[in-house]
Image (cartoon, grey):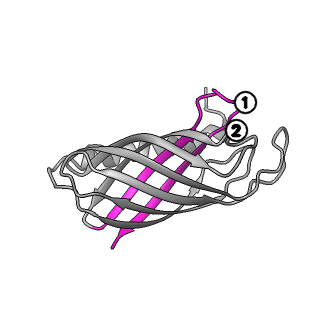
Amino acid sequence: MHPEPRLRPIRTAHAAALALAAFACVATPARAGVELGIGADQAIEGHSTSVLALDFVTGQDRHPWEFAVGRFGAHHPTGNLDYAPATWYLAVSRRIQWGHVFVSGGIAYDTADDDVLSGHWQFATGIGVRIDRWTVSLHHLSNAGLVGHNHGETFGLVSFAF
């Protein structure tokens, strides 16, 4: 049985993240600095939007803090989804690193309260690979259904560190 067409991008993104994680198992200390990322979110009812993020990562070797500000483009009304305006978010999370690979978890505040991100407070999770100045990562913001109906935002980023 084939997966539903709308789930294929998610599975492809997860497979790519796992492949990069398997590739990147060489120990490297974290580097403090600013990362500028661009990407896209998972299509919700057939509509995907652009994502822009600016992160500051502290310099601890294994468990740096990550402070992020980002913006999702607007989701236009389709099917069961009402219009969701462009949304800004602020997030604080902690990265746990193994070589080039990291996972992160924390909290985020967003400017929306709509069908995509209901409520303003969200959990922030991520997985990624950083090699030299480049980071490829997959993130998810969601309130885990604690407030209203919540699709959440799953998004991929390619970032460059300055």
Left or right: 83 as drawn, with respect to 142:
right
Which residue is identified by label 2?
118
Name the residue located 67 percent from the left edge and 37 percent from the top edge: 151
Pointer 1 residue = 148
Where is residue 15 shown, x and y percent of the image?
Answer: 43, 42
The x, y position of residue 160, in whole percent, is 38, 69
* Residue 45 image-quadrant placement: top right
Q: Position of residue 11 (x, y in %)?
A: 52, 39
* Residue 18 visible within the image: no
Mark 1 or 2 closer to N-term? 2
SS for callout 1 = loop
Residue at 57% across, 47% down: 109
Q: Is residue 15 above or below residue 61?
A: above
Of residues 30 and 158, the one nearer the viewer is 30
User: The residue tagged with tag 2: helix, strand or loop?
Assistant: loop
Distance CA(mark 1)–CA(mark 2): 6 Å
Residue stretch in magenta? 133-162
